[in-house]
Image (cartoon, rainbow, N blue to C red):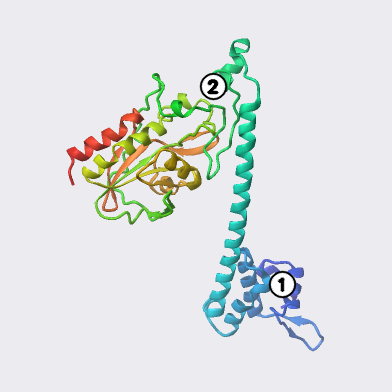
Amino acid sequence: MRIGELARRAGVTVKAVRYYESLGLVVPDRRPNGYRDYGEHDVRLVREIKSLAALGIPVERTRPFLDCLAAGEAHADDCPAALAGYRDAIDELTRRIDALTARRAVLTAHLHAAAHRAGTSRPAREPEHNPDERARTGPGTEGEARMTTPMSADHPAGAGPARLTREELATLPPDLPVPEDDGAADHLPGLALPPAALPATDGSTVRTDDLGPGRTVLYFFPLIGTPETDLPEGWDTIPGARGCTPETCGFRDHHRELREAGAQRVFGLSVQGTAYLREVAERLRLPFAMVSDTALTLAHALRMPVFEAGGSTLYRRQTLIVRDGRIEHVFHPVFPPDAHAGQVLDWLRANPA
């Protein structure tokens, strides 16, 4: 076949085929008139080069895979040299990820420093001179200038201004809306936790399908705030949103009792990143690890209740009692959050394993 037909069948350009030839990856036969003559093997080679390039393996590093096919193997990665090619590509990706992670850390530090300057250097505003402005900025310290911080893997959502002090984060307003039971978690009891490897604040990896024998208390919360970051606009008006710090402090304070009542493990879990949650765990002196599920892996696998706030998808507040890998009991909705650890403790005591 001619080069145009080869390119069409392999889904590449003629220019790409000529480049592969220049590297010696594709070597066509020659007709008596000097024209190139390609066969079915060449089509397979070009398709393999294209597939490997889609995985991030440069064309120049595909030779071990093509040699594997030339040796008669059924697959291009059936040879040790091809496996080494995979490892080299993975190592390269790891180096790039590490470099990007370091760059993100530097940018985050600059963001925090800039946000702090912006939040402390501006003169305080008098709300009574502009009531509309007060309504827009939401609850918090009167006259405080606030900045919005977008949510990332290591930062909470921040679609609108609502920065609270440590004291405010640890207490609940008296008139929070009560979440209703809409049945969104009714299907969860009896389900097995899917396989997922999630990072924890103690440096470990929590495998949800291998939590260990006995009972595990896994409480899900939307996002936990800090004095340096903003909560989404209207956070206190969302039923079940406010109260992650009081809830977490409750599990901290009742941790020994929960263990004595049969909970072998306690974990808190949210979509926030490990670095962010690690600061929370250290500041609140938690005796248990916080787990990060930035991709909402469990929510997708189990169809768990979630909600939207600040342009992000967050877990609804809910707690799973997991026993030997299966969900034994579900608390949903959870209210009030500051009393929830006591509710879990009462259930464990009333339902001994």
What element does badge 2 sit on? loop
Q: Nearer the viewer, residue 36 or 156?
A: 156
The image quarter containing residue 173 is top left
The image quarter containing residue 175 is top left
Q: Mark yes or no: residue 36 visible.
A: yes
Instruction: State the residue position of label 1.
Output: 5
The amino acid beneath tag 2 is Gly
x, y (%) of residue 37? Answer: 73, 82
Instruction: State the residue position of label 2.
Output: 138
Q: Which mark, residue 106?
A: none
Q: Nearer the viewer, residue 237 or 8?
A: 237
The image quarter containing residue 119 is top right
Instruction: Give the side of residue 258 with respect to residue 59, left or right.
Output: left
Instruction: Give the side of residue 324 with respect to residue 49, left or right.
Output: left
x, y (%) of residue 197? Answer: 42, 55
The amino acid beneath tag 1 is Glu
x, y (%) of residue 334? Answer: 34, 32
Q: Is residue 97 above or below residue 168?
A: below
The reply to whether the C-beta atoms of the residues labelled 2 and 1 are less than 8 Å apart is no
Q: Is residue 228 above or below residue 70?
A: above
x, y (%) of residue 239? Answer: 41, 27
Outermost residue on the top side: it is 128
